[in-house]
Image (cartoon, rainbow, N blue to C red):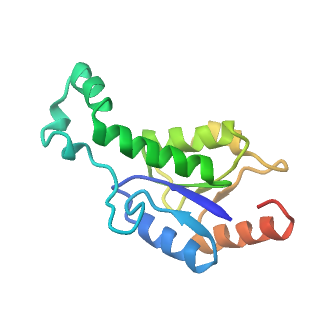
């Protein structure tokens, strides 16, 4: 299975999720380390004072070559994957990535080891009448294995 892990830079679980999914035999895109010798995207590479930006600063930064390359790399990984694992807690970008995958007909599953807030719209990811939210990594990996055995991945 080709998996895009959507999460937050602040999520302490993200590295172990990537590692565990790879150990289970999946090909996994890691936005923190997208390729050997590459670091993931950071606004601070464009401007160390990025947190103080106004909307116009943000719009300009979206056109920066560094941002365009990073976006292209992540977008290619989204197109490549057949499954998106949304690891909570996460922010807006991860939810946009998961939503994009769902809109493309890709499987989206949620790992909610820490549920900060219940969200009704996770039902958009329903498959076979069930919302694919798992509270442990073992449950998630088992569900992915079952899906592969059924020929869905």
Residue 52: x %, y % from top left: 15, 31
Residue 53: x %, y % from top left: 19, 28
Residue 76: x %, y % from top left: 53, 47
Left or right of 111 on screen, residue 108: right
Left or right of 117 on screen, residue 48: left
Q: Residue furthest left?
A: 49
Q: Which of the 4 quarters of the picture holds residue 147?
A: bottom right
Kindly identify the residue that appears in the image at 44 percent across and 64 percent down: 14
Kindly identify the residue that appears in the image at 63 percent across and 54 percent down: 81
On the rendered image, what quadrant is the C terminus found in? bottom right
On the rendered image, what quadrant is the N terminus found in? bottom right
Left or right of 130 on screen, residue 58: left
Residue 71 visible in image = yes
Q: Nearer the viewer, residue 148 or 17?
A: 148
Q: Which of the 4 quarters of the picture holds residue 118?
A: top right
Kindly identify the residue that appears in the image at 36 percent across and 37 percent down: 68
**Exactly how many numbered labels are in the figure?**
0
Q: Nearer the viewer, residue 135 or 39?
A: 39
Q: Residue furthest bottom?
A: 23
Residue 13 visible in image = no
Kindly identify the residue that appears in the image at 21 percent across and 23 percent down: 54
As drawn, 65 above or below 13:
above
Left or right of 35 on screen, residue 80: right
């Amino acid at each position: 299975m080709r998996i895009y892990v959507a999460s937050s830079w602040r999520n302490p679980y993200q590295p172990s999720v990537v590692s565990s999914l790879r150990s289970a035999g999946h090909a996994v895109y890691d936005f923190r380390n997208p390729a050997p010798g590459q670091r993931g995207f950071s606004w601070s590479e464009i401007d160390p004072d990025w947190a103080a930006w106004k909307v116009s600063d943000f719009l300009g930064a979206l056109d920066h070559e560094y941002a365009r390359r990073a976006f292209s790399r992540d977008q290619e990984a989204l197109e490549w994957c057949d499954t998106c694992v949304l690891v909570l807690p996460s922010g807006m970008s991860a939810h946009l990535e998961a939503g994009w995958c769902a809109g493309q007909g890709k499987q989206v599953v949620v790992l909610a080891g820490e549920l900060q807030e219940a969200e009704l719209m996770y039902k958009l990811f329903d498959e076979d009448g069930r919302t694919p939210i798992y509270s442990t990594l073992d449950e998630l990996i088992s569900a992915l294995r079952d899906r592969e055995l059924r020929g869905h991945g």
